[in-house]
Image (tube, rainbow, N blue to C red):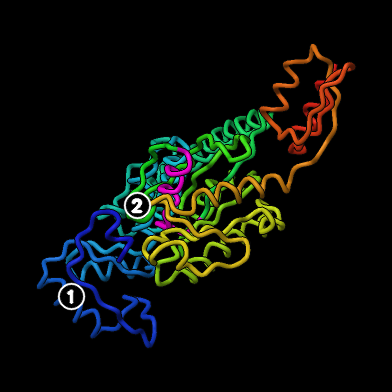
């Protein structure tokens, strides 16, 4: 119901139907089809949404029985993704998933599928049927989309490489859809990313700078929300948007702690991340760099009312309560992955000294006649870069 409401559908009828057995023709039993048909007709329903995966035949038969458009869970999620995608890559991924989905449903979507086009004179024989032509055109479009997506991904890879050359730590937000990630993103960075109380308000990765208590700067990345039973057509596109998570120095798992199914949502998110590990997209040690953020504490009476586990931080992105503790936790997690090094710089090496203050944490400094003696905490990549730059 939340998925349907999030795309603007007005829900006038809702039913939970137990299934003793799945009917190949209609999914539902004959009595259920008839009863729901009468209820839909009484409400003049234009679109019926089935929270399950329908075969093309089941979809066609239900539309004939109910005299209205019928879409399943996969089709609904694809429609939401298509409406919300804004970046070039997001639009390409959604179109590719939609074409994969529609290719198996051509038999339902067209009324002229068996008409034949004339054959070429030099070939003779019957021409290709309309369904064959449509499948061929969709196949060609899919191949072209995959080539374009590969180019976009190469470009984004170059952007990540460029960020490593000016390496600020990356902090990635992950979590179930509508957990409040974009609201938290805005509260931490002062950005104005779209944040609504609806599913999949964010589909495209967004990045902003984040200033931490130590003075260290980081990059905060907002990502698409997770959902249970993601359609198979969207799995590849969905995980591709999470590549920033694999590169992140800190992962913030944002939970809607006030949601009645918060524990189940947490399990769904962990399952997706474990799937990324199995696919080789994410290191198996990701829990060591993860902070669990218990969001929407204001709905439970405040941060003090939220039961917490080790490594978790309770916050309210709306009121700002707990954000200082979250920034400190991010700072500490980044520092835990840093290395301590000692350097002696000449008095004339002002640019290198400024670089250390910008990219590291100066723990001790002693100004001597022979130069500046420093004890600095740096990310491994920053340390290697600084030492390579030595004159």
Q: Which residues are magenta?
A: 175-189
Q: Earlier in the sequence, mark 1 or mark 2?
A: 1
Residue 146: x %, y % from top left: 52, 40
Write the residue at 63% across / 45% down: 331
- Can see residue 136? no
Q: Which residue is mark 2?
A: 80
SS at circle 2: helix
180 drawn magenta: yes
Residue 241 left/right relative to 87: right
- Can see residue 3? yes
Residue 162 against residue 149 in the figure, above or below: above
Residue in the foreground of this view, choosing between 101 and 112: 101
Give the quadrant of residue 210: top right
Q: Which residue is mark 1?
A: 37
Residue 313: x %, y % from top left: 54, 58
Write the residue at 86% across / 24% down: 344
């Amino acid at each position: 119901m939340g998925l349907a409401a999030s795309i603007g559908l007005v829900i006038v009828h809702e039913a939970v139907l137990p299934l003793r057995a799945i009917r190949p023709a209609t999914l539902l039993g004959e009595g259920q089809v008839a009863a729901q048909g009468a209820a839909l007709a009484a409400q003049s329903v234009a679109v019926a949404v089935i929270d399950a995966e329908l075969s093309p035949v089941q979809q066609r038969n239900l539309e004939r029985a109910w005299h209205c458009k019928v879409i399943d869970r996969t089709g609904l999620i694809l429609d939401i993704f298509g409406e919300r995608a804004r970046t070039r890559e997001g639009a390409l991924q959604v179109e590719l998933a939609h074409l994969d989905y529609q290719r198996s449903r051509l038999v339902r979507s067209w009324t002229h599928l068996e008409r034949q086009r004339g054959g070429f004179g030099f070939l003779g024989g019957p021409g290709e049927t309309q369904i064959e032509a449509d499948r061929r055109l969709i196949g060609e479009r899919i191949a072209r989309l995959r080539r374009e997506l590969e180019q976009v991904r190469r470009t984004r890879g170059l952007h990540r490489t460029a960020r490593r050359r000016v390496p600020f730590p990356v902090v990635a937000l992950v979590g179930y859809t509508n957990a409040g990630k974009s609201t938290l993103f805005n509260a931490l960075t002062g950005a104005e990313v779209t944040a609504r109380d609806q599913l999949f308000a964010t589909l495209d990765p967004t990045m902003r700078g984040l200033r931490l208590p130590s003075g260290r700067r980081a990059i905060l990345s907002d990502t698409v929300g997770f959902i249970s039973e993601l359609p198979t057509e969207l799995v590849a596109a969905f995980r591709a948007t999470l590549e920033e998570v694999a590169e992140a120095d800190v992962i913030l798992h944002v939970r809607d702690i006030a949601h009645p199914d918060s524990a189940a949502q947490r399990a769904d998110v962990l399952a997706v991340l474990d799937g990324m590990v199995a696919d080789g997209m994410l290191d198996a040690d990701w829990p060591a760099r993860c902070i669990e953020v218990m969001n929407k504490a204001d709905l439970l009476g405040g941060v003090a009312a939220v039961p917490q586990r080790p490594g978790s931080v309770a916050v309210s992105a709306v009121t700002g309560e707990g954000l200082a503790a979250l920034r400190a936790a991010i700072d500490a997690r980044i520092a835990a992955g840093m290395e301590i090094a000692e350097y002696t710089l000449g008095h004339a090496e002002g640019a290198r000294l400024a670089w250390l203050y910008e990219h590291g944490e100066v723990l001790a400094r002693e100004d001597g006649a022979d130069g500046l003696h420093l004890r600095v905490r740096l990310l491994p990549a920053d340390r290697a870069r600084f030492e390579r730059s030595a004159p």
